[in-house]
Amino acid sequence: MALLLHILITMVAVWITTALPGITLEGEDTTAKILTLLAVSVIFGIVNVVLKPIAKTLGCLLYLLTLGLFGLVVNALLFWLTSYLAGELRLPFHVDGFWPAFWGALIVTIVSSALAGIVRRARPRVEER
């Protein structure tokens, strides 16, 4: 259930990024766009799970030197890679370059964090005995 919720949150965040110039989501109808967003969210999740730890490990010194700001560059590159992979899978989602990927990744991070926080607070907590 938590995985499905995480994918839905990412879908909303990616959908919001399509309002930015340089990030496009095409589709014949709303259902096609929703399915594309679902696929892109899954791809983005897989890319983050597989490649982000590797990038953090290899770029450890850059993270330290930039006080973590290098993470924004890594997130942008992963978002851009997601666009490339979506294109290879013939999904109508495209990011035009680094800067749209940078702003898109930043928005995905902010929106995902905000929505996850709202969902976390809305869930009833199980009391421990």
Image (cartoon, rainbow, N blue to C red):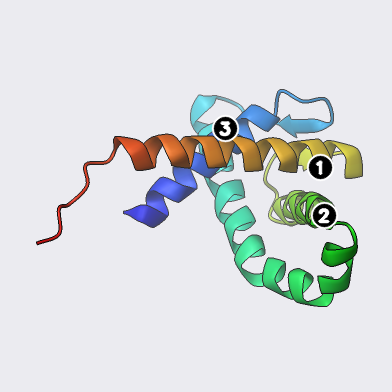
Residue 50, image x, y percentages: 64, 71
Residue 95 picture quarter: top right
Instruction: Measure the alpha-carbon separation of dots 2 and 1.
Output: 7 Å
Provide the secondary structure element on which disc 3 rests.
helix
Q: What's the residue at 48%, 36% (across, down)?
A: 115
Residue 121 picture quarter: top left
| Image marks 2 and 1: residues in contact by CB distance under 8 Å | yes
Q: What's the residue at 79%, 53% (across, down)?
A: 84
Examine the rendered structure and indicate whether residue 14 appears above or below residue 87.
Answer: above
Position of 66 with respect to 7 (left or right) is: right
Instruction: Measure the alpha-carbon separation of dots 3 and 2.
Output: 23 Å
Of the 4 image quadrants, the one containing the N terminus is bottom left
Q: Which residue is mark 3?
A: 33
Residue 72, image x, y percentages: 80, 50
Mark yes or no: residue 116 visible.
yes
Amino acid at pointer 1: Ala
Q: Nearer the viewer, mark 1 or mark 3?
A: 1
Residue 77 bears which disc, if any? Answer: 2
Of the 4 image quadrants, the one containing the C terminus is bottom left
Provide the secondary structure element on which disc 2 rests.
helix
Residue 11, image x, y percentages: 54, 39
Examine the rendered structure and indicate whether residue 106 appears above or below residue 59.
Answer: above
Q: Earlier in the sequence, mark 1 or mark 3?
A: 3
Q: Which residue is mark 1?
A: 101
Between 77 and 87, the one nearer to me in the picture: 77
Residue 91, image x, y percentages: 67, 45
Position of 11 with respect to 67 (left or right) is: left
Examine the rendered structure and indicate whether residue 1 appears above or below residue 54.
Answer: above
Amino acid at pointer 3: Lys
Mark yes or no: residue 26 visible.
no
